[in-house]
Amino acid sequence: MSVSKPLAHDTAPLHVNGAARYVDDIPLPANAVHLAFGLSPIARGEFTALDLSQVKAADGVITVLTANDLPGENDTSPSAHDEPLLSTGALHFKGQPIFIVAATSHHAARRAAKLAKIEVNETDPILTIEAALAANSRFEDGPVIWSKGDSDRALAKSKNELSGSLPFGGQEHFYLEGQAAAALPGENGDVLVHSSTQHPTEIQHKVAHALNIPMNAVRVEVRRMGGGFGGKESQGNALAVACAVVATKLNRPAKMRYDRDDDMIITGKRHDGRIDYRVGYDENGLITGLEFEHYIRCGWSQDLSLPVADRAMLHSDNAYHLKDVKITSHRLKTNTQSATAYRGFGGPQGMIGIERVMDEIAFALGIDPLAVRRANFYADAPTKPRQTTPYGMTVEDGIINALVEKLANSAEYDERRKSVAKWNAENPILKRGLALTPVKFGISFTLTHLNQAGALVHVYQDGSIHLNHGGTEMGQGLFQKVAQVAASRFGVDVSNIKITATDTAKVPNTSATAASSGSDLNGMAVQAACDTIKGRIASFLANQFGVKAATVKFANGLVSAGGETMPFAKAAQRAYEARVSLSATGFYKTPKIRWDRVRGQGRPFLYFAYGASISEVLIDRLTGENRILRTDILHDCGTSLNPALDRGQIEGGFVQGAGWVSMEELVWDDKGDLKTHAPSTYKIPACSDRPMVFNVDLWQGENREDTVYRSKAVGEPPFMLGLSVLAALSDAVAACGDGTVYPNLDAPATPEAILRAVSGQENT
């Protein structure tokens, strides 16, 4: 059986030899035009005059379009219809598109776009949390409040209490392949769109509305992306719509790709913000009452901010059972790029708060932070008495205690705590820190109707199999995993499966490949389609050989019926000649889920994925420079569909999460100008930044829920394992003081932030 085998990524050879084809690599006819946006020079205000004469006269320019030239809806928003493709006057962030240039080359379009003369009335931008609160600049009428129990009463009765505040930064997606799209006009107003997108149906929908045509006139195809991380869930809409509008207007193919500078200036980031907290606890560190206040900076448009902020609230408990808790969330509108989906989708922003609380309680009590965490963990299944999350979902699949115990033992946590303490006592300049942090991450879309998927499977008469589904491949290995599912259902080698590009003409109404749902949803849909065809072949052969269909076996490339055994290809040929249909669709919708967002109650997730990481770091108290010396991870993938791909996701997710909390820093000036808009000014983790010793292992156990082969999602949960790095850095900073003042290390913990925190220790 191909499932659970550590097979290589299906296009790994193409990746390493440069032959993998991305949108920008697709050959287009010689008359194709290339597009670029003309951008707002200010963060807030309006343009009063727009002189495009020099733009139109520039070398290579074919046409220039403004909002008045658009044939249909001037909208690229995935939610609130508040994101015009082109501004009609109002300007909301520096980098907002105002016009489109179509030219004979990419560089000609970009050069021409910079020649516009734009007269503006500038207004002071709203950039900070404080400014947004003062102006009541929000995306909802007021804060969203969810609660469980009575936090006020519990806090009043608590033996101990502390409060604090944790600012955390945003994050640039920095996918290797930037945003890109191409559109080719067809007959009768039809259009084919190639897009680097996680959400082909959303692209189809937005293009159709922009052109005033039905969705069946728009076909969107996605073979692969060079990374997405959530940044291609909604942010690709503008490019695809612009290409489709220009292609249909000129009756010529149109292509658009952002340079890295333009990409970072135009597109949305991870939501940054601040968490204020107030917590009561007993002498063992058990939390007796807790209040969180989330201040989430959403940027200029709503985009996906509401569900992101919701998920931050949903993961405020992480792996800890909280009896009396209140979570308040402010979704603030600012004159910056639209904050959008990013790996974890608000989960990291929620978990960072509770992990800070755990560390500060441990510091106040003078005990090991792991002891405090263990005191507050959800019980392992089966749980008695019943334990529920702050939103009322029963935790039925808990394994965090056993998982953490196994990791702590295998990584020698207790011994290394002693070793770190000894090192810090002997070394005045270089200080070490050690921390273990857990992850409990809910798997499903919180917008319930998105939890569905379709698939299309063909078996050809020679036994080869054609596979299509609604998920998109962005390097994570989804296509290979789903191909392994199909191969296992038919009992053939995975080489029999042809994995084809995601195509809205084959599988309609797909959800985004997001929320860690790619394998869960599409794997089950493909399984259903394969089983339909397999059932038809089995029934046909059973009738041929006078046996029951249930006795027909598919394994090792062979089909056995009665006393007859034949190659799968022969069985397919016989079925074809007997006029048996060898094509089927499959559909899956996630069971059991229900969610009342207004009340903050229900079961938004089918199950939880668990994990834990131990990180050991070293800081230089004189410079703030730091290194991750070692990381040990134990992560729960259920019964892994492909251990090699899952390990890759765990390693990559951890490094990306560590980057968020330790080095990636977005900086805007007081005019709303993003200053970190290139690799020269924005640091992502390099190979040298990964742990010097990096041990990753998979938890051995199947999913309690009936998922595809009892596997668990692995796309997002490992990102939060990176929180152990922030906790370890804080532990190292604490070693610079006398133990009386908590470090309050901000995120990201850049060398500058570490120096500030060290200074706070030295001044006590």
Image (spheres, rainbow, N blue to C red):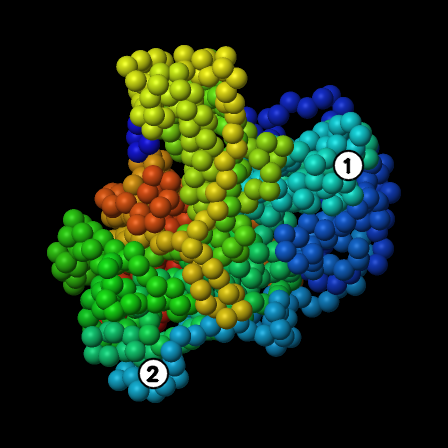
Residue type beneath disc 1: Val
Numbered badge on residue 523: none
Q: Position of residue 305 (x, y in %)?
A: 56, 59
Quadrant occupied by the C terminus = bottom left
Q: What is the C-alpha distance between the residues marked 2 and 1?
A: 61 Å
Crowd class of label 2 (few under 14; some 14 to 19; many from 20; radius 10 Å): many
Q: What residue is rendered at 30% in x and 87% in y?
A: 157
Q: What residue is rendered at 31% in x and 47% in y?
A: 703
Residue type beneath disc 2: Ala
Placement of 397 over or under 678, stated as above or below: below
Foreground of the two, 517 or 370: 517
| Residue at the disc numbered 2 | 154
Q: Is residue 189 left or right of residue 459?
A: right
| Residue at the disc numbered 1 | 246
Placement of 709 over or under 133, stated as above or below: above
Crowd class of label 1 (few under 14; some 14 to 19; many from 20; radius 10 Å): many
Q: Position of residue 704 (x, y in %)?
A: 30, 50
